[in-house]
Amino acid sequence: MDLSTKLEIVNQSDVGLKRPHNEDSTITDGRKGLVILADGMGGYKAGEIASALAVTDILHGITNKLKKLNKGIVDETTGFYKESLIVRETVIQANSAIFNTAKAVPQCQGMGTTVVVGLFHNNILSIAHVGDSRLYRLRNNELQQITKDHSLIQELIDRGLYTPEEAHANTPKNLVTRAMGIEVDVDVDLVEESVLPDDIYLLCSDGLNDMVKDEEIHLTLSKYSANLVQTADELVKFANKRGGKDNISIILIRVREDFSSAKSLVQKIKNCLNK
């Protein structure tokens, strides 16, 4: 199904005010309902290479695998849609490509990247992520962080050693506990979310949420939600106003209408009968 009329997608990336170049990479494909954001790390421009490899390999991998897929089927073993398993499998394969490149190219040694991937299908959003890049959902004017950071701060909070406020005040930011390309294997979190019309989803690198609090992200999304381009502009401006210490990348998606496969089948039958 072509989702370009079902979803409104805005993609924006800004170098920020402190970094010499942009190590974030983003790719979107509205027809496939595919959005990918990666935040690279490493030596001189190595993070930029890692994030670019991640988004391009994942895009091509998912695109090729979807062509061969009998869509809308739930895997009996895992309970996930086959589309979701493809997303996770492709992230794992991209991890191997980044890891092997880092080993083979001296200037790329130690490079890695976070990633968050969203694939819309059959009124479902399949989400795979590694690291601390995030995916939020705004529904009925309530903002919820769907992904959970793979970071030292989050680990300290989960263990009950710090409150969220204490962890953010006393722990260095940007210390991730998982990333693509660092090890030969990677643990990928996989989540499925039911999608409703008028939902707004936000993917972002930590250059946004390190500078702008969740409450402020919520207010900005609510205030400018009628215009996603303006929303993205305002979020970038907000992060830069706070110091712009890192690259800022944002993907915004508005669900315009239902895109269930059952509804699509019914419409195809109606079209045939009306011919």
Image (cartoon, grey):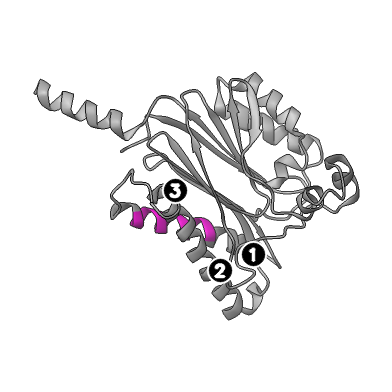
Q: First in sequence: mark 1 or mark 3? A: 3
The reply to whether callout 1 and callout 2 are in contact (CB within 8 Å) is yes
> Magenta stretch?
54-65
Real-space Cα separation, disc 2 to disc 3, in angstroms = 26 Å
Residue 204's place in the image compared with 176, above or below, is above
Q: Which residue is mark 1?
A: 112
- The mark lying in front, picked from 1 and 3, is 3
Residue 46's place in the image compared with 131, above or below, is below
Q: Which residue is mark 2?
A: 98
Q: Which residue is mark 3?
A: 80
| Magenta segment includes 56 | yes
* Rendered residue at 67%/60% (across/down): 178
Local SS, label 2: helix
Q: Quadrant of the N terminus?
A: top left
Q: Is residue 85 visible?
A: yes
* Rendered residue at 58%/58% (across/down): 51
Query: In the rendering, at what x and y percent does residue 266 appear?
Result: 23, 27
* Rendered residue at 85%/45% (across/down): 168
Q: Quadrant of the C terminus?
A: top left
